[in-house]
Image: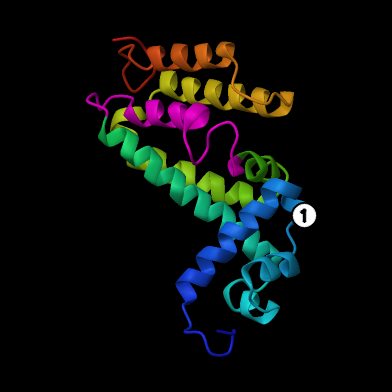
């Protein structure tokens, strides 16, 4: 069946475009993602790709947003299994950073997040995401203490990614365990011990 006779499935094509662009980004970096390479890999024309994403920036932002949606689902699943509401977002966030399938240490997230550091549009998407999550979890995770734990997790993740190590070290997993232990310490919303 050729492109002219097959049934149109825009949602499946969009999904394939995002997945393929992500694979290219993992192999070549975000700078290596080209419209032609993605269109060719999915088997659509460039016009078909432009129907979903009008330019490369829209495609990159679409990948970033898609990954955040996967991270959202991962965090929500982890939180639903946590019997202790206080600090549950922070624990899920820490676990996602170190071992989660969407974020984790060896995922597409690494390439995209490194790009977000220098790309204002991606930084804004990230900033909006974290602000929305913090608003949603203000009753359980709005303490200075938990904020510091999330920042420490971000810093540990960044140190790992920039070190070029191939896999998680036991030292890094010890950091994860210590951060998770710290979320159990009872603190009020001002970050002061109760």
Q: Is residue 186 left or right of residue 162?
A: left
Residue 38 in the image: above or below residue 143: below
Q: Which residue is mark 1?
A: 32
Q: Residue at x 38, y 38 (%)?
A: 75
Q: Position of residue 46 (x, y in %)?
A: 69, 77
Q: Residue furthest front?
A: 1
Residue 179 in the image: above or below residue 54: above
Q: Residue at x 46, y 25 (%)?
A: 147
Q: Quadrant of the C terminus?
A: top left
- Residue 137 visible in the picture: no
Q: Which residues are magenta?
A: 82-109
Q: Quadrant of the N terminus?
A: bottom right
Q: Secondary structure at mark 1?
A: helix
Tell whether position 83 is magenta: yes
Q: Position of residue 175 (x, y in %)?
A: 52, 14
Q: Is residue 175 left or right of residue 31?
A: left
- The answer to which of 172 and 27 lies nearer the viewer is 27
Q: Position of residue 95 (x, y in %)?
A: 44, 27
Q: Position of residue 94 (x, y in %)?
A: 46, 26
Q: Residue at x 53, y 23 (%)?
A: 153
């Amino acid at each position: 069946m050729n492109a002219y006779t097959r049934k149109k499935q825009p949602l499946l094509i969009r999904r394939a475009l995002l997945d393929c662009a992500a694979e290219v980004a993992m192999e070549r970096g975000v700078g290596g993602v080209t419209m032609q390479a993605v269109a060719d890999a999915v088997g659509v024309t460039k016009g078909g790709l432009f129907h979903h994403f009008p330019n490369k920036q829209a495609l990159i932002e679409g990948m970033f947003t898609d990954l955040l949606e996967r991270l959202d689902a991962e965090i929500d699943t982890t939180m639903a299994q946590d019997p202790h509401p206080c600090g549950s977002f922070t624990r899920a966030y820490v676990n996602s950073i170190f071992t989660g399938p969407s974020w984790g240490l060896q995922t597409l997230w690494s390439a995209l997040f490194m790009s977000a550091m220098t790309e204002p549009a991606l930084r804004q998407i990230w900033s909006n995401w974290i602000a929305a999550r913090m608003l949603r979890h203000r009753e359980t995770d709005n303490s200075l203490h938990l904020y510091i734990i999330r920042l420490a997790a971000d810093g540990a993740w960044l140190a790992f990614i920039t070190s070029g190590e191939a896999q998680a070290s036991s030292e890094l997993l010890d950091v994860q365990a210590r951060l998770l232990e710290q979320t159990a310490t009872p603190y009020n919303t001002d970050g002061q011990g109760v």
